[in-house]
Image (cartoon, rainbow, N blue to C red):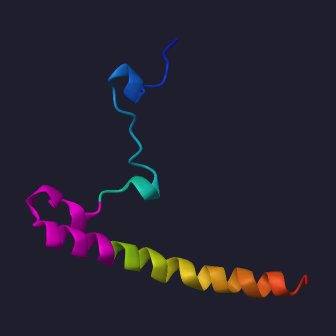
Amino acid sequence: MTTPSSPSQGIPVNRGHLLTEQTNAASQFLDQLTPLAFVDLVNQEDQKTIALIVPKLTVDAHHLQKFQ
């Protein structure tokens, strides 16, 4: 019987099927960026995340108000 691979065994676990573990082309060459370019890129990617989350939070807040 085989056991699943794990980083602790020195064999990386393949998580490529998970949406959150997909390669981000924008951050492919982080090691080649200047510190300022790195911070700018991280900020841009964070803004994308916030833009996706805020509308969901608003919907949830309106939903919760129905129960008060």
Q: Is residue 33 left or right of residue 60?
A: left
7 magenta-colored: no
Magenta residues, start to end = 24-44
Res. 66 image quadrant: bottom right
Q: Main secondary structure of the magenta part?
A: helix
**Relative depth, front residue between 9 and 50:** 50
Residue 47 percent coordinates (x, y): 39, 79
**Is 30 above or below relative to 63?**
above
33 magenta-colored: yes
Res. 15 image quadrant: top left
**Relative depth, front residue between 55 and 42:** 42
Residue 28 percent coordinates (x, y): 19, 59
Residue 58 percent coordinates (x, y): 66, 86
**Is 66 above or below relative to 42?**
below
Q: Is residue 44 left or right of residue 34?
A: right
Toward the right, the furthest residue is 68
> Which residue is rendered at x = 34% and y = 32% of the image?
12
Residue 52 percent coordinates (x, y): 50, 79
> Which residue is rendered at x = 40% and y = 34% of the image?
13
> Which residue is rendered at x = 14% and y = 59% of the image?
29
> Which residue is rendered at x = 42% and y = 27% of the image?
6
